[in-house]
Every structure is written in structure tokens, then in C-alpha cells.
Image (spheres, coloured by chain):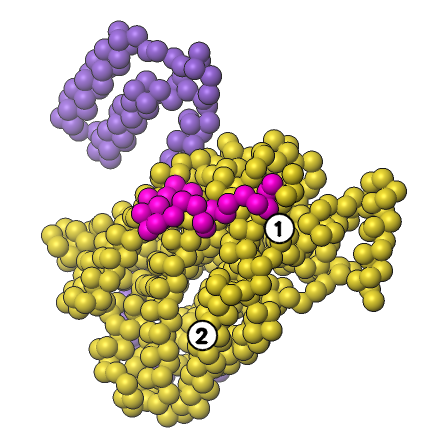
Chain colours: A yellow, B purple
Amino acid sequence: MTQAISDSVSYLDEPKGIKSWLFTLDHKRIGILYMWSIMVFFFIGGMMALIVRTELLAPEQILVSADAYNQLFTLHGAIMIFLFIIPGIPAILGNYVLPLMIGAKDVAFPRLNLASWYVYIIGSLFAIYSLFSGAVDTGWTFYTPYSTQTSTSVTAMTLGAFILGFSSIFTGINFIVTIHKLRAPGMTWFKMPLFVWASYATAVIQVLATPVLGITLLLLIFERVFGIGIFDPALGGDPVLYQHFFWFYSHPAVYIMILPGMGIISEVITVFSRKKIFGYTAIAYSSLGIALVSFLVWGHHMFTSGQSELAAMIFSFLTFLVGIPSGIKMFNWVATMYKGSISFESPMLYTLSFLFLFAIGGFTGIMLGALSLDVHLHDTYFVVAHFHYVMMGGTVMAFLAGVHYWWPKIWGRMYNEKLARISAALLFIGFNMTFFTQFILGTKGMPRRYYSYLDQYQPLHAFSSYGSFIIGIAFFIMGYYLIHAIFKGQRVGKNPWGALTLEWTTTSPPPPHNFEQTPVVTDGPYDYDRIMIVGDERVYKDGPEEGKEIAKEVDSESKK
Amino acid sequence: MDKHKNHITPVSTYLKVGGALLVLTGVTVAVSFVHLGPFNLVVALLIAGAKASLVGLFFMHLLYDNKLFATIFSISLLFVSVFIILILFDTLTRDAIYEQKAQPIKATQLIEKPN
């Protein structure tokens, strides 16, 4: 039987030809299509960030004019948010591993899944078109009244984001139905891996919140094109209403970005601690808790916008509530590592980076949620640092943990672990150099989005820019060894990490229909207290005598 | 879902509901000629709500289908109301800020020092 599985063709080999990829209904291939396209935009957005940071080395012009600078930071934000980080984890890793994790052959609606990729491409074409037709200089938030007046290409860019929203909704619908309907026999809700729970919570937000972004951006386009006046005070409108509309989506969207990342952390931390996750139900429910609370806190982006004091107080109070489910997760992850048999392979290094950086990002979020402090820190580099700690230190680190964790499953080959560790270390150092400095800049009063600045800020700005160059180097190393692994990496078996979730019970790379036989789930996803993986097989520590002995032997060998 | 459970609504029900919708439209028009002050809006919203419920329950089959659909539909309404209510906390109480800030600066205030 084992022989039969390892001989079976992988989804990478059959069927062949470019057409078989472009019209594929296989969730794994769609995940890979998403991966390449999203990585292109990640590269573009990243290069823009490097140009911005280079320009900020000195207060005078170095590379680009002030107008080009405004467009570059706007495009960096818009591309990274709408084209990279929102679809990133759900569309790439979610698409690839979610059906595998629940023992399904595919997602519930494979055609809708493929459609979502095409919709993503169409949306991104609008974004690219806007690049060449005047770009956008509003900041990624497109605030009125400036966004209705600027001569740059706001309409094309917002239309692009509007279309991308549909792609996001399609993925969300697909995941909700897949999780409800296609779980393997025996996989009850509380035997689902936590990445699946996190993806479920994310999907709920995608489906509920994204339409509001659609409405908002359409209203903005109507405002620009027809002057309907809903955000224009001269016509009885209200510019602050735009911010309400925008953040009613965009705040939950922040959780669309971070929740699946948290799911990855839950997976990786258990596997590399060889210990049952601490507080499974608490982590699962806290995902749903975050999803719920995320809809009630958007006003904290608007404390200084002219919103009423009463509303600001309510939103400030509600914002503090987000700290509870996030804190529950942090403590559970740390408790999972306690007395575990921790190993520091690269996925775990990224996970540990996440724990450090997300903690800082989360705490500074609570600081910014406090009304009196926010008045001073609003629109300074402190905010920039905060959201990069959450989005890059949080989501991107978790994404990289997931990429390194599932890369051998996706391609059947392992990357160079030594280079992976070097790049993880460089990334951690470069990241903190870049963004911790920005916390200090912010508290010293450096406003965000400025092209030039007072001389006193220059040393810190320069230090921050040097950090960003280190980040750039780390990503180039990563790109090299990950792509190298696809072609020349060492082949791996079914389960190189010794994990217990279902995706590791099939071959690497998996066959087109994932499993030779529908798996029947009898064990929990994290039962490391009673199961260990020897070779590719499960050995039950509490099973027959033979199993106990093998377990003991392997234990003592690993201790040597 | 079990196919045997699929409910087939008789045409007569559709006609009755359609008739009710037309009648309610007539009522909306009629009420607009009666001056009730602010209650004009309340009455119009109540009639519109009743019509939307009829459409949802009969034409969209929410009455007969799995109650999960009705629940999801209600949740979306709940979210719309959360959105509107929290925005009203802002727009209805904004005067509180402007009243204080819009007062002319008095000469005495400029002289007074905190200590």
C-alpha cells in the first residue's frame, strides 16, 4: 500500500501543459497560481518600499521627486494590502493545505475557486493600469476630500480594489462551505486543525465585511465621476462618513490578514514543540471572538478626525476588548512550548519571531487605542511602526513560517536549512532596525508620509533605512533558496517534520486527488502526548507493547 | 439537503403575496399625503420593512428553507444595524465638540494661567 502511494503521480506532473494549469480546478494548482502572481506584487511592493526608504536617508532629494514619493508610498501600501497581504495566506496556503488538512479531495466549489484567481488577475490589471495612468497619491486609505479632487488615477485603483474584493469573497464562501461539508469521516469540529478554525473565522469576515468595501469604493467613484455629494459638505455630505465606511471594512480586514497567520502559528508551534497544543478550544473560540469584536472597533482610526467625543470613547473602550482574545492566543502558544521538546528549524524560527514581534505590535495597538495618547501619536511614525509590527512582524512572519513549513509538502523537496536560518535571522534583525526606530521617531513627533524632515530626525531615519536594506537582502536570499529547492532540493518523504495533521499522511507532493483513500480520522491533530511519527508511520505510545518500545528507543536516540 | 423536504409554494400564495405588496405600495403613497410630522418616516419604514419581510419569507423561501439561511440573513441585518447605530453615536453627538470649540476666545481666558 505504501509503495502504491509513493509511486502515484503527483499533481505537479499530471496533467501537463500550460493550459492544464490555466484551466485547472485542482485547489493545489490554484494555490500555486496564486502564489506566483501574489509574489510578483510582493516583489513590486517591496521594491517600492526600498525606494521610499532610500529617499528618506536624507531630507533632501536623493532618488525621486516629492510627487513620485507620494505615489510610491501610496502604491506600496495599496499593493501590499490589497494584492499581497489580504489574499496572501488564505489564497495561497489556505487554498493549498485547507482541503488536505480536513481530508477532502478539493474545495467545495472548484470552479468558483479558479474564478477567484481570474478575478484577482483582472483586479490587479486595474491596479497596474493605474500605475501607468498617473498612479495614486492619496495614501492607501483613499480619504476624501483629497481622493475626490486629486488628478491621479484614483478611480482605476479603487475599481481594482473593488474587483479584488470579489476574489476575496469567493475564497471566503468556498472555505465556509468546504469546512462545513467536506470534512473527512471522524473529523468533528473540535478535531479540526487550528489553521482550519482560523481560516473559517477569516472566511466569515471576508464574506461579511468585503461588500462594505465594495459599497464604499463605488460611492467614492460616483463621487469623483458624477459628484453625487455623499462625502462633500457643500452638497450636504460628510467626509468623515467616508472614514466610517472605509474602516468598517478595513479594520476587520486587518483581522483577515492576521487571523490565518495565527492559525499557522498554532500549527507550527505544536509540531516543533512536540507537544499537544495548550488550550485548543480557547484558541479556536478566540479566533471567532476576534472576528466578532473586529466589527465594533473601526472608530479608533478616527479619534482625531472630528468624530464625536462620545463615539471616540465607545470605540476606545471596545478596542481594548480585542486585547483579550489576542492575549488568550499568546499565552496559549507560550504555554504550548512550556516543557515541550523544542527544535529550532526555520519554520519555528519564524514562529518565534512572530511571537516577539506580534506582542510588540499588539501592545502598541492598545497604546494607540487609548484616546489621550492617540491624539499625540496619530499620524506619526509610531503608527507606521505599530502596523508594520502587526502586519509584517505578525502576518508576514507567520506567512513565512507557513511557507517554510509546507514548502516540502508543496514541492516534495526541501530547501537549504542553513540559508533559511540565516535569512530568518537577517530578517529579524533588519525588521527591528527598521521599525523599532520608527517607534522612537514617532514619539519624537516625526509625522508619517512626509517627504522631507527636520535634520534632527536624520540619524534615526538613516538607521531605519539601513535596516530595510537588510530586510531586502534577507528576502533575496530566501527567494534564491526557495526557488532552488523546487528544482534541486533534496527529496523528502511524506512527513519530514513528524507532524500529525492529515496533509502529512499523503505523499509529497500529493497526488491530484490528494488521498488514495479517504482518510478516517481517529486521532486529534495535536496528540503528541500519545503518538509519535517514526519514519512516516504513526506509533502509539499507549498502544501495543511493541509501539511503546519503539517510542522509547526513538526517544532515547533523540536525547543522545 | 433532502430533496423531499423542498417546499413547492402554490402559485396562489405568490399571487396573494404579490397583491399584498401592491396594496402596501398603495398605502405608502396614501400615507405620504397625511402629515404625521416625524412619524411619516417611521410609518414609511414600517411599511417598507413589512414588504421586505414578505419578499424574504415567501419569494426568497426563507420561511420554508433550513432555518440556517434565515439566521444568516438576520445576522447581515444585525451587522447593518451595528454599522448605522455606531455611526449615529458619532453624527448625533458631534455638536458636543463644536459647541465648546466654537466659542469666541475671551480675553480673560488668555490671561488666566493654569497655576
Above/below status of A362 relative to A256: below
Q: Which of marks 1 and 2 is nearer the N terminus?
A: 2
Could you say where residue A430 lies in the image, as x and y percent from the top left?
Answer: 51, 79
Choose between A287 and A342: the one closer to the eye.
A342
**Where's residue A439, x and y in %?**
48, 77
Q: Give the range drawn in magenta.
A: A4-26
Main SS class of the magenta portion in the image: loop
Residue A175: percent from left, percent from top: 46, 41
From the image, which quarter does the N terminus of chain A lie in?
top right
Q: Crowdedness of circle 1 by 10 Å Cα count: few (<14), some, many (20+)? A: many
Residue appearing at x 26%, y 67% in the figure = A138
| Residue type pointed to by label 1 | Lys
Question: From the viewer's perspective, is the residue at label 1 or at label 2 nearer?
Answer: 1
Three-letter amino acid code at the position of disc 2: Phe
Q: Residue at x 43, y 32 (%)?
A: B72
Please name whichever residue, A45 or A295, is drawn nearer the observer in this view of the structure. Answer: A45
Q: Write down the chain letter for disc 1.
A: A
Image position, residue A458 (x, y; %): 40, 90
Q: Which mark is residue A476?
A: 2
Residue A473 image label: none
The answer, for residue A359, to whether it is visible in the render is: no
Q: Residue under label 1, please give it.
A: A494
- Asked whether residue A18 is drawn in magenta, I would say yes
Asked if one can make out residue A35 in the rendered structure from this viewpoint, the answer is: yes
- Within 10 Å of disc 2 (Cα), the crowding (few <14, some 14-19, many 20+) is some
Element marked by disc 1? loop
Do marks 1 and 2 share a chain?
yes
Report whether B17 appears left or right of A394.
Answer: left
Give the residue drawn at x 45%, y 49%: A13
Contact (CB < 8 A) between labels 1 and 2?
A: no
Residue B10 position by quadrant: top left
Q: Is mark 2 on a helix, strand or loop?
A: helix
